[in-house]
Amino acid sequence: MVKLIIQIPCLNEAESLPETLARLPRRIPGVDVIEFLVVDDGSSDGTAVVARQFGAHHVVSHRRNRGLAAAFRSGLDKALSEGADIIVNTDGDGQYEGADIAALVTPVVEGRADIVIGDRGVADNAHFSPAKRLMQRVGSGVVQSLAGTKVTDAVSGFRAISREAAQRINITTEFSYTTDMLIQAGRKKMAILTVPVRTHAAVRPSRLFKSIPRFIMQTGITMARAFTAHKPLRAFVGTGSLIAFIGLLPILRFLWFVAQGDGSGHIQSLVIGGALLVLGALVAILGMVADLIAANRKLIEENLARTRALEDRITELHASRVNELPASRKRAS
């Protein structure tokens, strides 16, 4: 039996949530059970109450606003604990077309993908401004390079995730999970596909960021953290080598003056160059240490994935044993 849970992170979405829930599919080929999960991220407008009234099977509530990444993590944890085989993430403001969830889920059901991203057609999407189109395309190109995978709409929150992939993804950012998740998935050699999806016009300004410069800064920090966490040797050794190369230039300048018989007045070049060479070597050494830490992180993540798999197996065994018990003993268990 294949169980799909559609999770919706929300912040003050009481007005738009009923229509969003109504648009979600009730039947999808290859899926036996569909349930809805709303993550109320500290809303003050009764979003959790509205979610229960309009058909949400599960509601997770944060006492205060913790951000989109934390809401996404809470949703994944709850969906996994409820036995989801596939998890779809969508928005509570109705930006995405609920009927397109079937297109997201199909590659996962067929075993062709671990993660499927809904491509909003950024290049010619009528709902995006020219500045937003350019920003999305540049950001997606950077993520493709860092993740080593082809994703044309990297910051799309409309995505489907298999249970195995969700168990292996560990979101660490506090801003937005989208780029962090893709870089992790790409570095872990997961199968990632994209499918075209439809969008609706935004009904309100984004609550994720207050301005485009702030969004660019936060997204850049997230991508840099994710890349250095998974490829520290390349990041630090590359940076150290660049610093050392810059330090080599004033040293060569000093040597050239020495060869000309005029080295006494250019000792500062030797001092600056030597300092940069030492700094570059220290940064490279930090990269080696960070690489060892990253190797330990991989081992920890593998053990975590195995622990989650064991938990699933224990749950399955318990359920099968309960089903084999007489009705009177089932109630006792």
Image: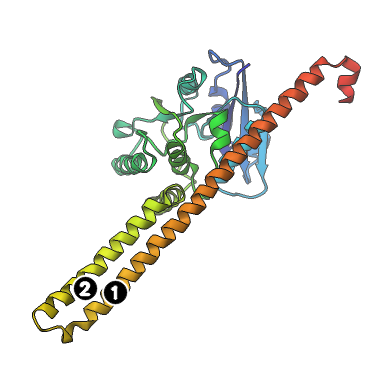
Task: Find residue 228 and name its label.
Answer: none
| Callout 2 crowding tier (Cα within 10 Å): few <14, some 14–19, many ≥20 | many
Q: Residue at x 46, y 29 (%)?
A: 96
Where does residue 144 sit, x and y in percent of width and height? 35, 39
- Please tell me which residue is depicted at 76% across the width and 22% down the height of the picture: 319
| Image point (34%, 65%), residue name | 280
Q: Which residue is mark 2?
A: 251
Spatial CA distance of label 1 from label 2 is 7 Å
Q: Quadrant of the N terminus?
A: top right
Could you say which quadrant of the image residue 156 lies in? top left
Residue under label 1, please give it.
Answer: 274
x and y, in percent, of residue 27 in the image: 57, 15
| Element at label 1 | helix
Q: Are marks 1 and 2 in contact (CB under 8 Å)?
A: yes
| Of the pair 89 and 41, the residue shown nearer to us | 89
Q: Compare residues 193 and 129 and report the one nearer the observer.
A: 193
**SS of the residue under disc 2:** helix
Note whether 244 is above or below 192 in the view shown.
Answer: below
Which quadrant would the C terminus be assigned to in this image? top right
Camera-side residue of 222 and 210 = 222
Instruction: Give, as a three-letter code, the residue at label 1.
Output: Gly
Asked whether the viewer can see residue 199, the reply is no
Q: Position of residue 42 (x, y in %)?
A: 63, 46
Q: On the picture, is 109 further left or further right than 79?
A: left
Vertical position of residue 118 compared to residue 64: above or below: above
Q: Position of residue 142 (x, y in %)?
A: 33, 44
Image height of 168 relative to 290, above or below: above
Disc 2 residue type?
Answer: Ile
Q: Quadrant of residue 307?
A: top right
**Number of labelled discs?**
2
